[in-house]
């Protein structure tokens, strides 16, 4: 006995080692992008990736509210200072564009103002234009603002510098209060930052989020003050955290519940150890196969995989419960194997549809499930009997008394057909189940947080992450020239109200051609001095008043055009890099659109350019299209899988009425589940479909075993008991998923739990176990 | 200074003449002043262009209808503007302590004709402000003169209004 137990624990130890090794070798990822399909066209794929993992994904929006504006402004300045010195950010901008706030950028812009500013035109340097400028200067000098006016007025009466600064600060409607950005109502200070780490680098983004919270604690502007942090990276981090918390909870809770249930049913501590072997083997194999095939295992696959326990545990449970008194476990497994192999094969066949999907996440789930099911069945056949014998687990002797009474339900199967018919009618009347095409609703980030993100984005004038225009060129200059030509279209769209604004690289860094044209517009010193003299007639300016201006214009006439490499201030370099960059040998300019109100107008305007260098992408529309295509595909696989399962059953059972008795209740359960989900107001996603596939795989077992040949009433009892136990095991695991925060896991849980409940009832009442002729025997 | 701190509110009209090195003739502006103890100051320029400057506590608001300008600053963030504001406000409030935070303070003359000479302590402020001279008679200010390092000066003559 002792030695046999030792063997059980040795087997358990080997399996545990296999599971640990499989998980250690697996690269578990939690970002949603790994789960979602890529775009259809090359351009869409590029932009999709750029939006998800590029610079747009590293933008973090910060709001501080709940205190007096002055206190908020102080907090904003304090936080910006601390975050800038943390080294985690490419830039932190709170609206303070002083030389210190811009990291020396202001001096750079002042030096290069005549090449960078749109104010540099030949017209701006005519005597007439200068005359208007001088009048304005005089007015400024008379006013209280004289100390400020004096600072740049004599060196730059044409206002080139102010124009450049204005471009950089943004045409956005952000209010400036106490030197920093405020939301229009004035109750919220705003900051925008870009992390150095990639938006999908979850570990690094968690550090960033912690740094922001710490900075807020240090400057805490008062007891009621709140910190708001948002952005794609923040969402990714939160989603990852939610998925991680869910999977931890689910794996522990479902394992515990299942163990408790098995202990109660089989009255042996060893039974849990024995059952853990096929389960462990199936999970280790599934993780290893997915890792091998995909190079990583997604957190959702993993969380879902833990619930595979609830499916794969069916086979060992069937063996344990169906074993007759006096029969060895080896004999029992041989007896039930034909039915079990048919059950496992149909389940695997049904799930193959998922495996072949072009949706990487679904494909993983499919591979995981198919592997899990097949390995669990094989382990039940070839490993489990020896372990059961070694552990000395006996057959189940007692069956709950209510199981005997349950057979009465079979007398009136029509009673159970009525709700199914009603469910079918309901579905028909509602025009089929409602579909969810918005992938955003699958995110574990709650709607209110996404609303807050949209609000902060609008207030701060940060670009929309949904709409984007890309400009492609052979080099940076080509992209900038194309951008300059396209800019008037953007201004027109802004005037029309189709967009609230746009950011385009050429506004910050004009093309060399444009800069050279500006340089050519600058008059020679003597000429400029003469024009200033004419312009200033009748005004009290002395002859040498504008010497700094003349000198700076003359210096600009000898300057080389500013290039990206000349921009050293981090805040400015980061801004340009997000709008103009090289990828794979080509140069790209991104036009970031702010608050897009009329996407069609933008799409039309881009189409009207009729230029392959320009691409407009509506990320949401693109995603919706991908999801719709994947959904159509899944439907095809679902139908194909169903057909294959029916064919398999027909071959395996060789009796069309039995095929109907096995497959019919499953179809009925499908209809009932869809109707219940519809009544619950659920909108179907891809993941519901997947769950339905899984539920079909599980419930085929029920029909197959209920319709087996039974040689005695006791056997029939055992069958019912075993199927009920299988069902409870599935409910214990999938039922738990319904409590998850991650919508994907939740929808899988709800669907499978509802489905298997309907399936067991229907499979039972419609089953007609064939009385066995006494001659046949196994 | 004690007599000044007794004043709770005062109104006056002003005429300001700025002489700039870059200009051949001075720039002249006129308007009214309002002071309410301890920290409220208004300067309304009526000619040649309307402009309203209001200082209240730590907040400075400048409005210029002709340019659609309406800006608010926090004085704490603008130490140089703060120094200028305090030269007048703290003098009116009789707040010698605040004055001494920004300037070295010299006082000459009699209670009937006194002169306060303020030299900025902060080097940043000294870059654009050499000194401020404030002339007074009793608890009224009659003149404020600022001198900048480049020789630019501004001279404001103040005439108290009754009430």
Image (cartoon, grey):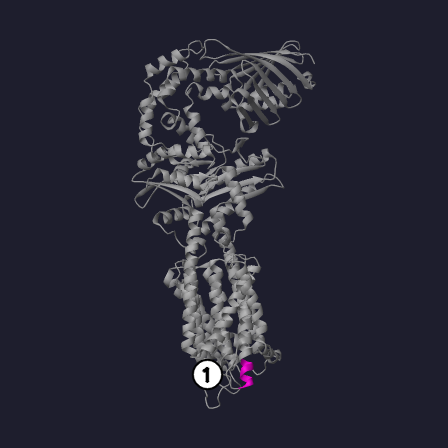
Residue stretch in magenta: A712-718
Task: Name the residue carrying label 1.
Answer: A335
Q: Give the quarter of the image for residue B163.
A: top right
Image point (53%, 65%), residue name = A424
Q: Is residue A294 magenta?
A: no
State the predominant SS element of the stretch in magenta.
helix
Compared to residue A503, the image places residue A54 above or below, namely below
Image point (33%, 15%), residue name = A527
Percent x, y of residue A754: 55, 66
Percent x, y of residue A294: 38, 60
Compared to residue A571, the image places residue B49 above or below, namely above
Quadrant where the image shows the C terminus of chain A: bottom left
Looking at the picture, tell me which residue is in the foreground, A657 or A305.
Answer: A657
Percent x, y of residue A97: 47, 31
Q: Is residue A715 magenta?
A: yes
Residue A14 visible in the displayed image = no
User: Are there few (<14), some (14-19), or many (20+) residues within 10 Å of tag 1?
Assistant: some
Percent x, y of residue A774: 49, 90
* Secondary structure type for disc 1: helix
Compared to residue A18, the image places residue A612 above or below, namely above
Residue B28 visible in the displayed image = yes
Residue under mark 1: which chain is it in? A
Compared to residue A591, the image places residue A401 above or below, namely below
């Amino acid at each position: 006995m002792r030695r046999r137990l030792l063997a059980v624990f040795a087997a358990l130890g080997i399996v545990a080692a296999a599971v640990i090794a499989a998980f250690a070798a697996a690269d578990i990822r939690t970002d949603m992008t790994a789960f979602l399909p890529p775009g259809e066209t090359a351009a869409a794929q590029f932009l999709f990736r750029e939006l998800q993992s590029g610079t747009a994904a590293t933008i973090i929006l910060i709001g501080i509210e709940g205190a007096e504006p002055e206190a908020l402004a102080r907090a904003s300045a304090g936080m910006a200072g601390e975050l800038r010195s943390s080294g985690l950010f490419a830039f932190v901008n709170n609206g303070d564009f002083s030389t210190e706030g811009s990291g020396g950028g202001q001096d750079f812009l002042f030096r290069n103002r005549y090449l960078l500013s749109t104010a540099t035109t030949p017209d701006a340097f005519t005597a007439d234009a200068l005359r208007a400028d001088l009048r304005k200067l005089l007015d400024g000098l008379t006013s209280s603002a004289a100390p400020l006016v004096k600072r740049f007025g004599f060196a730059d009466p044409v206002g080139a510098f102010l124009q450049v600064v204005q471009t950089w600060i943004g045409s956005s409607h952000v209010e400036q209060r106490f030197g920093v950005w405020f939301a229009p109502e004035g109750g919220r200070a705003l900051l925008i930052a870009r992390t150095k780490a990639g938006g999908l680098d979850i570990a690094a983004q968690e550090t960033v989020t912690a740094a922001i919270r710490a900075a807020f604690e240090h400057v805490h502007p008062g007891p009621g003050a709140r910190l708001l942090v948002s952005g794609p990276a923040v969402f990714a981090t939160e989603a990852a955290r939610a998925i991680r918390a869910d999977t931890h909870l689910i794996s522990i809770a479902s394992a515990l519940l299942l163990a408790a249930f098995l202990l109660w049913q089989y009255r042996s501590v060893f039974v849990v150890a024995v059952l853990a072997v096929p389960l462990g083997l199936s999970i280790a194999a599934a993780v290893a196969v997915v890792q091998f095939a995909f190079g990583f295992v997604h957190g959702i696959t993993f969380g879902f995989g833990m619930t595979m326990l609830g499916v794969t545990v069916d086979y060992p449970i069937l063996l344990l419960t169906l074993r007759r008194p006096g029969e060895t476990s080896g004999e029992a497994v041989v007896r039930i194997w034909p039915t079990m192999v048919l059950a496992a094969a149909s389940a695997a066949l049904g799930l193959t549809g998922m495996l072949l999907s072009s949706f990487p996440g679904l494909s993983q789930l499919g591979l995981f499930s198919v592997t899990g099911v097949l390995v669990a069945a094989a382990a039940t056949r070839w490993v489990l009997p020896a372990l059961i014998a070694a552990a000395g687990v006996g057959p189940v002797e007692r069956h709950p008394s209510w199981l005997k009474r349950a057979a009465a339900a079979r007398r009136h199967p029509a009673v159970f057909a009525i709700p199914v018919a009603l469910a079918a009618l309901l579905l028909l009347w509602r025009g089929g189940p409602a579909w969810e095409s918005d992938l955003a609703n699958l995110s574990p980030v709650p709607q209110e947080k996404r609303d807050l993100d949209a609000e902060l984005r609008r207030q701060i004038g940060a670009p929309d992450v949904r709409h984007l225009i890309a400009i492609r060129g052979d080099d940076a200059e080509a992209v900038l020239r194309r951008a300059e030509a396209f800019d008037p279209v953007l201004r027109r769209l802004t005037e029309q109200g189709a967009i609230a604004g746009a950011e385009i690289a050429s506004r910050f860094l004009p093309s060399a051609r444009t800069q050279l044209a500006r340089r050519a517009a600058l008059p020679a010193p003597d000429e400029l001095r003469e024009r200033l003299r004419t312009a200033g007639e009748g005004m009290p300016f002395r002859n040498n008043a504008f010497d700094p201006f003349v000198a700076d214009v003359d210096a600009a006439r000898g300057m080389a055009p500013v290039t990206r490499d000349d921009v050293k201030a981090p805040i400015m370099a980061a801004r340009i890099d997000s709008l103009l960059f090289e990828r794979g040998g080509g140069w790209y300019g991104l036009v970031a659109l702010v608050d897009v109100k009329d996407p069609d107008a933008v799409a039309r305007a881009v189409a009207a350019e009729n230029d392959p260098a320009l691409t407009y992408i509506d990320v949401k529309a693109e995603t919706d299209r991908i999801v719709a295509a994947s959904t159509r595909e899944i439907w095809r696989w679902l139908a194909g899988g169903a057909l294959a399962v029916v064919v398999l059953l027909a071959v395996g059972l060789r009796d069309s009425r039995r095929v109907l008795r096995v497959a019919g209740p499953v179809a009925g359960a499908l209809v009932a589940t869809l109707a219940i989900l519809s009544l619950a107001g659920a909108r179907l996603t891809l993941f519901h479909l997947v769950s339905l596939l899984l539920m079909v795989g599980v419930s085929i077992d029920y029909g197959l075993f209920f319709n087996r040949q039974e040689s005695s009433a006791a056997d029939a009892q055992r069958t019912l008991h075993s199927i009920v136990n299988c069902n409870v095991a599935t409910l214990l695991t999938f039922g738990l998923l319904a409590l998850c925060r991650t919508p994907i896991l939740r929808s899988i849980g709800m669907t499978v739990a509802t489905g298997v409940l309907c399936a067991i009832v229907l499979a039972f009442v419609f089953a007609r176990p064939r009385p066995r002729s006494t001659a046949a025997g196994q | 200074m004690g007599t000044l701190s007794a004043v709770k509110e005062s109104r006056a009209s002003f005429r300001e003449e700025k002489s700039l090195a870059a200009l051949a003739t001075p720039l002249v502006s006129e308007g009214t002043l309002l002071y309410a103890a301890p920290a409220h100051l208004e300067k309304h320029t009526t000619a040649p262009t309307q402009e309203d400057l209001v200082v209240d506590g730590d907040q400075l608001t400048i409005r210029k209808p002709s340019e659609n300008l309406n800006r608010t600053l926090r004085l704490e963030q603008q130490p140089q503007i703060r120094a200028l504001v305090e030269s007048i406000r703290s003098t009116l409030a009789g707040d010698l302590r605040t004055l001494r935070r920004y300037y070295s303070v010299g006082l000459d003359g009699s209670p009937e004709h006194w002169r306060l000479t303020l030299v900025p302590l902060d080097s940043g402020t000294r870059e654009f402000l050499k000194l401020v001279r404030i002339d007074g008679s009793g608890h009224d200010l009659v003149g404020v003169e600022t001198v900048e390092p480049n020789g630019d000066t501004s001279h404001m003559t103040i005439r108290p209004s009754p009430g």
